[in-house]
Image (cartoon, coloured by chain):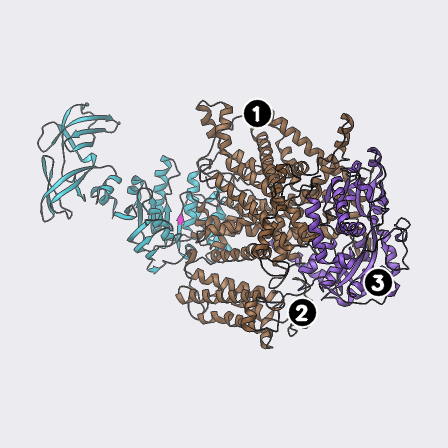
Chain colours: A brown, B purple, C cyan
Amino acid sequence: MRFRQTRGPLEPIVVLWMAIGWVGFALLPWYGIEDGFFGFSWLFDGYPVDSKFAPALVLALKGEKLWLAPLGFLLAAPLLLWGRNKSDPVFGRLLVIGGAAGFGWLLFQGFAIGLHGWQFSWLTSLFGDLGDRQFGMGYGALLVSGAFLFLLTLGIAARGAVGGDVFVVSSIGFVVAVVSIFIFMPILMMLANAMQTDDGGYSLVVFLAKLLSSRLWSLDCLAGGNRCGVAWNSLLLAVLVGLLTMFLGLVFALVVTRTGFRYGKLLRALTVLPIITPAFVIGLAIILLFGLSGAVTQSVAGVFGIQPTRWVYGLPGLLIAQVLAFTPIAFLVLIGVVEGVSPSMEEASQTLRASRWQTFWTVSLPLMRPGLANAFLLGFIESMADFGNPLVLSGNYDVLSTEIFFAIVGAQNDAALAAILALVLLGFTLGAFYAQRFWIGRRSYTTVTGKGDAGVHPRLPNGLTRALYVIAGLWTAFTVLVYAVIFYGSFVRLWGVDQSLTLQHYKKAFAVSWNEFGIHWSGSAWSSFWTTMEIALISAPLTAGIGLLTAYLLVRQNFRGKNAFEFATMLSFAIPGTVIGVSYIIAFNVPPIELTGTGIILVLSFIFRNMPVGVRAGVASMSQIDRSLDESSLTLGANSWQTFRRVILPLLRSAMLAALVYSFVRAMTAISAVIFLVSARYDLSTSYIVGRVENNEYGIAIAYSTVLIVVMLVVIGLMQLVVGSRNIGRRGIQKGDGGWSVRTNVSLPGTASGPTTIVGAG
Amino acid sequence: MIKRAILGAGILAAGMWGASSLASAESLTMYCGVDEVWCQQTARAFEEKTGITVDMTRKSAGEIYAQLRAEAANPKGDIWWGGTGDPHLQAAEEGLTEEYKSPLLDQLQPWAIKQAETSGHRTVGIYSGALGFGYNKDLLAKNNLPEPKCWADLTKPEYKGHIQVANPNSSGTAYNMLATIVQLFGEDKGFEYLKALHKNVNQYTKSGSAPIKAAGLGETTIGIVFIHDAVSQVVAGFPIVPVTPCEGTGYEIGSESIIKGARNMEAAKKFYDWALEADVQSTAQDAGSFQVPSNKAAKTSDKAPDLAAIKLIDYDFKKYGSSEERKRLLKKWDEEVASLPQ
Amino acid sequence: MAEIRGNAASVTFENVTKTYPGASTPAVDDISLAIEAGKLVTLLGPSGCGKTTTLRMIAGLEMPSSGRILIGGNDVTRLPATDRDVSMVFQSYALFPHMTVMENVSYGLRFSGHDKKEAASRARAGLELVGLTDFGARLPSELSGGQQQRVAVARALVLEPLVLLFDEPLSNLDAKLRRHVREEIREIQTKLGLTVVYVTHDQEEALAVSDRIIVMNKAVVAQDGTPRELYDAPANAFVADFIGEANILDCEVVAVQGDEATVRLGTLALKLPARGHQAGPAKLAVRPSRIEIGPAGAPQTIAGTLAKVTYTGSHLELVVATALGDVFVLSRNVDAPFQGGDAVGIGFPERGPVLIKA
């Protein structure tokens, strides 16, 4: 019998959240602890009486920070529900009011009272000088805010939202809260910062002057002038990179899937390489090959007797490096799409007397349109956000991402300018995002139907095949050359000067010795290496988790504001890393949320930067899992959490792996966001490598990158082993007998194992 | 299974972080403004000497100054060691650094003491380096170019496309050059010079020492940098020849400051004094840094440029280090020089 | 070994309306139903009529916009699916592809407070009930369609639900298997005395398995009755046409005396049960098999011409063009020498035509 009536005078889940809230309020230190989130020295250091470590309750009893006291009363409010059950209308209303008031007050006091007392002048004029101040929030505040949030969602669920499902409403509440705090708030604070003048005031005029300055928007170069505005430079580069990567990605996808090419696996493996390579390493290799003294430049100059030039610095070099780095992403997007075009459409076209060429042009290619748009968008955004390659290759061709960096760290020290440049960058990427949606339009491109699709993709016309082979062959040779240079470079003593082979770079970076305490990691790279591994391994599962949870909410649940919700979770996809970095230091350097200089801020930046990939992968696979699977689980008595955990997650292995691998790789290779966020204790590999590059120590930089690449390959392999261990019915069979068979169109680094077909109970 | 894995990772991480923070009983957070090797060497040496754990971040002087400003309300760092003197002075001017008179002050060179006095004892000189340039002798020979000896040589048309210098908007080194030229030739003539130089420049780099590194790799013939950076390239084995300009030149005073509101004030002061000691400063050359140390008793490398032999201008750090003058000159440079066709 | 028992309870709908968010018209409009315990009741209707929504509201997968739902006398209107003692067999069977047959069947038992041993023993009993004792270790993808169907049934049955729901359970099976499986379902239902609500759009299936059929059309109940009532006395043109085939003919009620109405159909006058009709224009539903066909000019017939004659083996399908319009007739007399163009007369025996609402 499954009629579950709650016993006891108070719902157990209310009691749980109240208890958590009270632990936060009365037991744990309210404010952040200096030695970090996981430092526990406070336990022996004057706790609980010392104001630095005291819980809010103790502070209130001591008569300090009295603005925290109302939180205690609000945390006790659910006791009024004694004896009432869930369906009582008072139950929901009280929880909603109490939770919202508590959460709201917590935020308000946090933002209103900062390091210098009142944060807003109108508060000072209203209440006079406060004469007190507060630091960033700590454990206590974290638990209390969680308690208020979930009491609020409990109330909303009790009032019947989303079928009264507590798990779903709480998840929505949770995702909305974290996305607001870690995506919207930083962006908004950056916007406010952009309006700020040097003396701390706000001025629209100054803002507009900077926004519309000729450094950004000048079109001199068209009129034969010196150079164009930075914004145009970035835009031109990004458009070119988007188009070229899309084109090359399509070429590769066609070669692998439509030409009977036998070494597809090898090609796929090769394309994974650039994804797991720290971006600027490719830039570096380009210099070693094509720079003024580069191997290729010199030999060409020698053979043809031409004066070698610095042609590679600027647009050409950037274009080569970025196309090399981002083509694999386009390839991975397009291969799924190319395979996803239903063969029967192409067969139909051929029976309607279209030739192979005509079929390709009029049916296959148009059906790939969404994939092409997606590939372009990814290339565009990646190029816009790329920081490493412009750092070494841009010459006098300034682009936004490096300008943002140097606006903050350079001699100008103009954070407002950085914020404005970041806004321009954000404008471009969001614009591209919308243009893409608009272009795909409302037409349906779904070619995978519920019916098993038994056809075979037709071969491409011979001429096209030959052209594809030539392009793919050349490009592959080029990639191999670049990687050979990278690999070889790590063993060369001093590139260009002393070509003798040596292991000294590896020794210098990764030396290990024994001393009386055990292993001594004496190499200079170890510290940043371990930090990077730690941060990457923590953030990857969190990213995958929150991404898949969000995907579940988007695909499986209906609630008001779902569109806005989807937009919000996808927004960070269009935000370049540089912008995230800038906005995070602006937002999280001061109370109430003080995170700069911690490892947590790195983890958070990775989570929210990579989350959209988890969401997309999850949405793609989840929409292919028949909804009746979760419904049947529900009717069998599992609640929605158990359903998510036991039915949906196990079926989402491929999406989970994609999200895990992607976020891990990103955390290991990203530079644009973290360059602003690294600190003494938490330095990351990429920022360390950039430092070496700046210092001309190419050998160490390249050796370190080589090690990273190998480590990533190993970890990805391990993840595949751990996550993908159980068989899910018939895999890879395209012909379900009357059941539904569909494919995942999102394949990502490491999961390039081809389309996954989940045959449900067919 | 997944849940357990996440949990495991979390516990592991918590353990590691917990352990590392428990271990560090006394610590010092150091923002380091010189190059990585020297930073590492210094941090480790201080750890060995005192047992205080040093958390070191290496950043350019500009970055550190920006960070100090950003963290002013809630400082995270304790000591700012190294990097060109201007941002140290700016920080002193804005009260971002702590006033402290080291007992070792009287052992220092006069320019180091002057730096301290200018700032109201909020910073002090630890090393000094003169501005100049360096060239790649192989490339120079290959292009049949004469050896440049003076600032004036660099504007000759035959060097067109052979010179690299950093952008003063992003680099302290380049701003130092801008200020040097203005002080050397006067503002009007100085800007005429910069305009002429602009025609020969193949790239304005972002970072100050990048031009000489590019020259080392053969990506440009001549780079305008601090001479000690050129010396480092020579020592590293690149075919570079450092040049001290015949007209005389400006210089920087690498400095150190204690960050106001430092959480480990005692350790910061201990470090501050320690870094001024003669035998500590003598070890700089081991890290491939060839600046002139500020302690009179400190040993210098024979490869290091002898400041006494260089014609130094009387660099007005107070004037050219101030925010207004800096903004004005940069704006003028942007409008009158950078916008010209090359 | 544990034994699977039936736990039948009644289902009651009181003025239930369901409007999906964003939809202008309700999917289910003010429906009231009472389904007795231990009966197999079919919800029948064309796609989009609201039958699946009704079923899902019983399951708790959809919440009504207004009205009350009671199961076994308890108000479950706001109770989510998880907390209702109702099991459902899905059209696609919805077997979890990553679990074995045994794991699938014991899935629900884990959430019902059974310990491992008891759950396993119940699951085995369930598999035995559907004749799949030896298939526990297989994955669903290794079973045939019919076997998967039975696993889905076993999975629902082992929970001993108050109500068992079937959503078009036969639509993925081939024609021969369908008859077999539906007989099995009926057998288990009678054996365990279950309350079963069964959704289908196949009228033949509905007639064959049901104790009672609820015909739905455009979000409302069109008719509710036993298979025979529905077939022999459809309430309106929709039901008449949807259940089997029917000729809908215009007629006029001339007079009503008690339960008997005198109806004029073309040239004929017929005495028929009034079924609440008053004098005035009306419609008649006539099953093709209940029309007699004879030579032209016979008494009590309407004259017509044979427009089309089709021989189907067991009977003849005839289309007769008359003054009333084309009339479709089934004749068992396959040896009759009918030919297109022949003049014939059609007659209506007693219990043939039924008066329906216009």
Is there any visible trace of residue A665 in the rendered image? yes
Contact? badges 3 and 2 (CB < 8 Å): no
Circle 3 SS class: helix
Q: Position of residue C152 (x, y in %)?
A: 43, 45
Reply yes or no: does residue A587 show up in magenta: no
Magenta span covers which residues?
A: C88-96
Question: Could you confirm whether marks 1 and 3 are on the same chain?
Answer: no
Q: Amino acid at mark 3?
A: Ile
Q: Chain of mark 1?
A: A
Which residue in the protein does label 3 denote?
B113
Question: Could you confirm whether marks 3 and 2 are on the same chain?
Answer: no
Q: Is residue B244 left or right of residue A401?
A: right
The residue lying at 50 percent from left, 28 percent from top is: A361
Residue mark closest to the camera, 3 vs 2: 3
Q: CA distance from mark 3 to mark 2?
A: 45 Å
Residue A43, label in figure: 2
Residue A237: quarter of image: top right
A355 or B217: nearer the eye? B217
Q: Main secondary structure of the magenta part?
A: loop
Residue mark closest to the camera, 1 vs 3: 3
Q: Position of residue C85 (x, y in %)?
A: 39, 56
Q: Chain of mark 3?
A: B
Q: Position of residue A213 (x, y in %)?
A: 61, 48
